[in-house]
Image: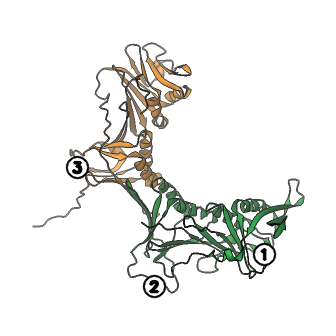
Amino acid sequence: MRFRANLINPVGLGKIALTLEKFGSTCILSVGMDSVRIIKYSDNDGSMQAWTYSSLFSNYRVESTNNNEINMTVVTDDLLRATRAAQQSTDIRIQLRKKRDQPILDWSMVSENRVGSTCIIGQEISVTIIPPERMRHIKEPAIAATPDAYILLPSLHNLKNVAGRLKSMGKYLTLSANMAGVFKLSVETELVQCETIYRHLENPQLAGHELPEDIESFASVKISTDNFVNFLNSYHLEPQNVICSLTDELQVAFYLYVNIDAYRSRTGDEPPPPRVTTHSNQPRTIMTCHIPVYYD
Amino acid sequence: MATTTTAVTTNVFSGEVNSLRTVLNLLKSIHIKNIATCNIYDEGITFTVVETHRVKAIAYIRRHMFEIYRKQQGQEVPTFGIGLNTLIDSLSLLGPASTPAADTCKIQYPSTGTHLVISRDDRENDVSTHCRLVTLEPDSENLELSLNDEPNLSQRAIMKSSWLKEAMSDLDKSCEKINMTFSPTDPCFSLTGEGNNGTFEMEYPEHSESFISFHCNEEATYSYHFSHIVYCNKALDQSDEVSLRVSRDGVLSMLFRIQESHVEFTMLPYDSSTTGDA
């Protein structure tokens, strides 16, 4: 089992870790031939999942008997702290090693100390390898092939402020959207019914999906207010677009399109990455978040 | 026969406040209990809270604070109760506005015994928020206490809130009782706090000229529960002036001027048989 890579985007990794930390204390780092996934997974329905596909590394080498894929559980806070140190450094090399029979991720990086001379800093993060049999059960929830509504959300930061205020009003909130650009947050208790309505939002085009006959009709799900507020911490990633996909009463998923490359610091001779827009140049990081839905 | 159709509002009351922030601050300053009683008059709206039958707080949201005020003239609107926690949460939900001019809020009471509706429509940002609050029976706790028509006031004074704030902050928090002494001779006003940790005394300010207005016929000392005086802190913080009135029976009224509106606290004198708390 071998894993070795250069971390070229420590700030990007840090922001992912910062977001996932709100969802739980550990996460899964899944490195394979084609992609790196950082997953916050939970067996029970009570919490959230986030699946991130990203290009944060270069000089990447993975070898394992499991189809050259290695999956490990890591304490998210450890990852966060390591990336903080790495942000001030260059030539960050990560390697999976064994230390006294325990697997660790060994980080080595070149840094400048206070006096101005360079030195090499090392860090170690304990990891737990996830055996393939267990990883087989860790799957992204299936999304209904044709959700009832999908919409581009308004600013996550703005939503976070509103959702934060809704927390004191109720434990659950209802998310609704239609294909006519309307998104709603509502809370209903014995004492009050509140609704915040966003209009003139964009409904993206989903290939092969026909618009429903009545585009004004709403698809709604009931979710925990806390879970929604935690999810909205992903505003740290400054996603370019966030799509909310709803299947009435059954499911909600959020797709965050993040230009993680924007966090890479450049050396003088590297060209800046192309500007990413919604319609051209796929951003390299997509985080999918699933929030459990409650049924009445 | 030609008839003109006019849009008739069937609401018992419908209005729009100019400054949500001011209304929110007024309500927070009387938030000593969850249930408040709401009265809608021709001149404005009041929210009243009565605690332990001994302290009453009223927030006055006068008509001039409204951009729109639609109520049938002379028609009495029955008093109703409302949850202050929920009302404050709902007003807060409308969120800060992008500009002070946009800090409006619609209030509607469609019909007696139904909901109170709070809403804001932000056309510029394409967001609108509404809250429908359940209305309740008016609070059974009542305190028919007002010094407004009292002809025989023992003491009257109007002072800068900052002075009273400073005097209050000097008092030890463990006090149980506050004594207010008014005198026609200097020092004309002094506060004493009494508690388990002893007695603390402040004479502040020294001369009656320091007050905006001061009337005192004879020296007298009145005592109040420290906890009741502390209820006024939020109102005191926001106000620039406070008017103190004491009746011959020792009932104290403190009227805090907050921007263009008022909050009034009325309280019965200290009663050693109660601790002052509910």
Q: Disc 2: which chain?
A: A
Tell which tag, 3 or 1, sits nearer the viewer: 1
Mark 2 is surrounded, within 10 Å at the Cα level, by few (under 14), some (14 to 19) or many (20 or more) other residues, namely few
Mark 1 is surrounded, within 10 Å at the Cα level, by few (under 14), some (14 to 19) or many (20 or more) other residues, namely few
Question: Residue B186's x, y, as percent?
Answer: 48, 14
Question: Residue B65's x, y, as percent?
Answer: 37, 45
Could you tell me if residue B98 is visible in this image?
no
Q: How many marks?
A: 3
Quadrant where the C terminus of chain A sits is: bottom left
Mark 3 in CB contact with mark 1 (< 8 angstroms): no
State whether residue B58 is above or below residue B274: below
Foreground pick, B277 / B211: B277
Q: In the visual, does A115 lie left or right of B147?
A: right
Mark 3 is surrounded, within 10 Å at the Cα level, by few (under 14), some (14 to 19) or many (20 or more) other residues, namely some
Residue drawn at point x = 49 percent, y = 58 percent: A162
Chain green in the figure, letter: A
Foreground pick, A241 / A94: A94
Tell which tag, 2 or 3, sits nearer the viewer: 2
Disc 3/disc 1 C-alpha distance (Å): 74 Å
Disc 2/disc 3 C-alpha distance (Å): 51 Å
Q: In the visual, does A192 lie left or right of B169?
A: left
User: Would you name the residue on which mark 1 appears?
Assistant: A58
Question: Residue B190's x, y, as percent?
Answer: 48, 19
Could you tell me if residue B175 is visible in this image?
yes
State whether residue B238 is above or below residue A53: above
User: Would you name the residue on which mark 3 appears?
Assistant: B72
- Residue B260 appears in which quarter of the rendering? top left
Chain orange in the figure, letter: B
Mark 1 and mark 2 lie on one chain; the one further toward the N terminus is 1
User: Would you name the residue on which mark 2 appears?
Assistant: A210
- Residue B129 appears in which quarter of the rendering? bottom left
